[in-house]
Amino acid sequence: MINIGLKQIGINLAPYMYMYNEVFNKKKIRDPYLNIMSWAKSLPHNLVIKKKLQAENLFKKIGITFSVYNNFDNAERLIPFDMFPRIITKLEWLHIKEGVTQRALAINAFLRDIYNKGEIIKAKIIPEDLIYKNPAYEVKMIGLKVPNNIYSPIIGTDIIRTDAKSFKVLEDNCRTPSGVSYMIENREIMMRMFPELFHTLNIEPVDNYSAYLLDILKTLAPRKCGGDPNVVILSPGPLNSAYYEHSYLADTMGIELVQGSDLFVKDNVTYMRTTKGKQKVDIIYRRIDDDFIDPITFNKMSVIGVPGLFDSYRTGNVNICSAPGSGIADDKAIYSYMPDIIRFYLAQEAILPSIQTYKCSQKKDKEYVLKNLKKLVVKEVHGSGGYGMLIGNNASKAKINLFSNKIKNNPNNYIAQPILDLSTVPIFKNRDLSPRHVDLRPFTLVGNKKNKLVAGGLTRVALKEGSLVVNSSQGGGVKDTWVLRE
């Protein structure tokens, strides 16, 4: 067994002594990380700097960027990449896989129910106001038959680890979950820079995601589809923060990337404009929000949607994935009911536990939250990307007061959760390895009588020491995620 001291590799765990470190167990390196820590120790300082620059140049060359909408001076940014991989054992992965698949099946059963019979509401498990008065609930979807009852075929589940055995779900992403292209490109860059690691270690691949996704989408053809379905990706365009991902997936799936102006509807059939004339479209993997899909049915001001698309969908001529109205399932207030949702539809207990969640819409919870803001993370119910969030123990008195007033004025818009100590994995920092908090987003694909999941996910890392915010829009970065075969 390789025995490497902490001083030898220049790592200081002192600021993180009370948090679970995925690499070290009682100051000894855990078995899955023995080889990689030996490798990290062997890298000369000048090579670390050289490889960091090489990775950055690869990201620039490939064009892997994201947009920050509140930074108008420099909107396009490279996503920071750290070379030290995050490792998950085979047994750990099987547990995660079983848990996220269970959630994905329950979420789709929940969506089918609330847009049809509403049995979970009749059973008084979820308050009807939380569904029917929810801005994410789409009344136009009531009673509409969705192909094979799959409303949300792509679900990104954000998972945190708090100790050696506990993986917990932070939130579900059902609308248009992003980040899968970073997962794949992180691997590609690591394989280019350090091919020797992949010759000696038995690591599961992630480059089969695009093939999996296309296969799953094709199982969801609309009822008026004849033959092999024609699939396209509908993007808002190059100014969207995830446009690189849209183009990457279209290229690797071998399908067309389109914008609203590339499609039109005639006699309730959706067509794509091509140099050879119109071509029927059967399945649209849409990466635009509900409100902008169709200016006739939804937001009349939308210039990125397709007029008449919802009627084409409603009449069974095209399938829109994910279905309009699916976003209610990743509402942060609905999240707090996920254990009940799993129990109700699957007659099972949740494999991956949720985090205790206080609903400010409920008087007792609101009072507790207002008294304990310093101990809590407060989130907007429909927020994303780390925006509109309060981390109480790091917040100024002014920010605490601001959120207190926000909760008092609009309690339905907020939930709160305890501040948890996310596990840490080292990053390369100058000559040393320094622990940083991480989360994991695996992507579950749900089709007609089949589910698929690549072995891995997007590991996001908080690059600022002590920070719990991993979102790229808030200064976070990414790591390659290795699932071991043995």
Image (tube, rainbow, N blue to C red):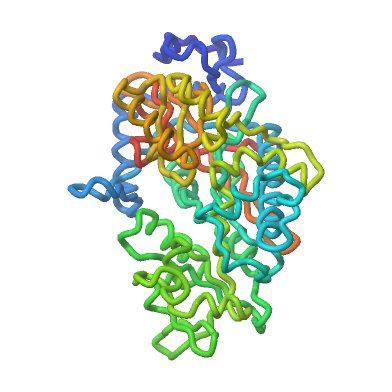
Q: How many tags in the picture? A: 0
For the point 56% across and 21% down, the residue is 34
Most distant residue in the right direction: 347
The answer to whether residue 14 is left or right of residue 29 is left
Residue at the image position 53 percent from the left and 23 percent from the top: 368
- The location of residue 91, given as percent across then percent down, is 71, 33
Measuring from the top left, give residue 345's x and y in whole percent.
Answer: 77, 49
Q: Quadrant of the C terminus?
A: top right
The answer to which of 262 and 393 lies nearer the viewer is 393
Asked if 375 appears above or below 145 in the picture, the reply is above
The relative height of residue 111 versus residue 340 in the rendered view (above or below) is below
Q: Residue 150, percent across and down?
A: 67, 62
- In which quadrant will I find the N terminus? top right
Q: Quadrant of residue 2?
A: top right
Side (left or right) of 64 relative to 5: left
At x 32% / y 35%, what residue is drawn?
Answer: 52
- Can you give x and y, in whole percent of width and height, for residue 62 in the image? 34, 54
405 and 258: which is toward the camera: 405
Quadrant of residue 274 in the image?
bottom left
Q: Is the residue 1 above or below the residue 400 in the image?
A: above
Please say whether residue 83 is visible from this viewpoint.
no
Q: Nearer the viewer, residue 302 or 404?
A: 404
In-image side of 446 versus 77 (left or right): right
Write the residue at 67% across / 57% down: 114
